[in-house]
Every structure is written in structure tokens, then in C-alpha cells.
Image (cartoon, rainbow, N blue to C red):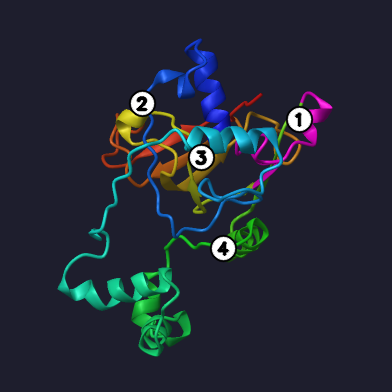
Amino acid sequence: MLGNIDLRCRDIFATDEPFGNVSIVLVGDIRQLPPVFDSPLYAQGGRDRDLELTGYAAYSVFEHCVHLKEVFRQSGIEEQQFREALLRLSDGKSTIEDWELFKSRQYMSLTVEEKNNFKNAICLFPKKEDAAAYNYKQLEKLGYPVARVMSSNNFQTAEHASTDDAKGLQKIVLLSKESRVMLRKNICTEFGLVNGSTGTVVDVVYENNKKPPTHMPTAVMVKFDKYTGPQLYEEPNVNVIPIVPAITN
């Protein structure tokens, strides 16, 4: 990725200087997981692809490093035990006490009241198929008809492209009323419609005499949690916005 950024910047600014001779700042935690199917930037040797070598050469240009030592996300006295347990976990030095602390927050150990607090929480899964299975179960629980929205492709390469190649667009999307959804692209940053914004589907709109899965919906009406722009409806505080089909090349 860094190699691609370096080469693209050189193309844009028409110079052979690293990163097109513009300022670049890298931010991250060295204890995070390594990149998928790739080596960390700081790893020595083991690179046999041109792009990997380009990325490593670009990384070697950086001369200054600022080490941030203070934790802000889990700050305060009340978070001290949790904060220290996380630090030991990242260093591979967890204790029995840390294990007991993490285990106390296992879902099965929580009270009914605590479980209800996480009823609408976003769940994280290690694999895409796990997330898809969970989402399907949530759709079933809603009890509404499910619209099967199929992608429309005008070329064989597009038809067989992966979600990553299609810049996040999926071949099949399942939607129903009251299903929770997440926006995958910036639409209007000024009013809070950004990549990662969450909301609830109010309705899936089709043209007359058209229906799923044969036809694409005209729009998906979504009530966003944190939309701050003009209201589509006269009723106050109804943040319903139509999301129309997206096209990618």
C-alpha cells in the first residue's frame, strides 16, 4: 500500500522525489496485527515483489519518529485496571488477574440488564461470512419481508469482481424495514453522512410494477442516527434520507 501511495504521488506531482516531494505523516501502533498477506514495513528482508521493495524503500525515507506514551482512550482512575491489562496484553505479558478481568465481561456472565445495553451494539467478527450469517439472523428476527438486491453489471469482469475490487459494493444486499445499516462512502460530510454513519431502514422504494430480486430499488430510505442537515419531512427530528444505488468502475 505504501508503495502504491509513493508511486501515485510521484505521478500526480510529476516528480521522481519520494511521495512527490509532499509531506507524509504515518500514524499507528507497532503492536497491531501485521498487514494481511504482506510484511510489516519495518520487517527486514523477505521481499521478492517489486511493489513490496518500493514500499520498503519509501518507508526508509522517514527520518523522524515521535513516540506517544500516554493513553487517552482508557483514561482516568476508574479505567486504570483495564488500561494496564490492555498494555500487558499487547506486550504478551498478561496475568491470571487480567484473564479474570476480561472473563468477567464475557457475554454469558453478564446480567439481563447489562445484555440489554448491548442490544443494538455493533458486533465485530473475524470473517466476512460470520458477519453475513449474523446479519441474516437479525433480519429474520425483524419479521418483515426481506428485499434481495442484486448488483447490476455490464461486463463479465465486473460480474466476477470481488467486493474489494468493486470498492465495497456487494453483489447481493439483503434489506428489510428496521434493519440496521452502515453507510460505506462519504455522501455529505457537512451534515454527517460519512463513511461509517449508521441508521435504520425505514423503507425500500421501487418503481411501479418493479420488485426484487429482478429490479434494483429506486432508493433505500434510511433514518440516520446523527444526520444534521435539512429535513426531508415536515415532522421534526425525522432524519430520513434516500440512499440511491451507487456505481463504481
Compare marks 4 and 1 and give the one earlier in the sequence.
Answer: 4
Between 234 and 199, the one lying in front of the other is 199
Between 24 and 156, the one lying in front of the other is 24
Residue that badge 4 annotates: 125
Compare marks 3 and 4 and give the one earlier in the sequence.
Answer: 4
Compare marks 1 and 2 and give the one earlier in the sequence.
Answer: 2
Between 22 and 109, the one lying in front of the other is 22
Residue 159 located within the stretch drawn in magenta: yes
Alpha carbon distance from label 3 to label 4: 17 Å
Between 214 and 75, the one lying in front of the other is 75
Mark 1: amino acid: Ala
Mark 3: amino acid: Arg
Query: Looking at the rendering, in which quadrant would you find the N terminus?
Result: top right
Alpha carbon distance from label 1 to label 2: 36 Å
Mark 2: amino acid: Ser
Q: Residue at x 37, y 74 (%)?
A: 88
Q: Judge depth for marks 2 and 4 and give the one in front.
A: 2
Q: Secondary structure at mark 4?
A: loop
Q: Residue at x 72, y 40 (%)?
A: 162
Cβ atoms under marks 3 and 2 closer than 8 Å = no
Cβ atoms under marks 3 and 4 closer than 8 Å = no
Q: Which residues are magenta?
A: 154-173
Q: Judge depth for marks 1 and 2 and give the one in front.
A: 2
Identify the disc placed on residue 224.
Answer: none
Q: Main secondary structure of the magenta part?
A: loop
Cβ atoms under marks 2 and 4 closer than 8 Å = no
Circle 3 packing at 10 Å, graded few (<14), some (14-19), many (20+), is some
Cβ atoms under marks 1 and 2 closer than 8 Å = no
Circle 2 packing at 10 Å, graded few (<14), some (14-19), many (20+), is few
Identify the disc placed on residue 184.
Answer: 3
Identify the disc placed on residue 158.
Answer: 1
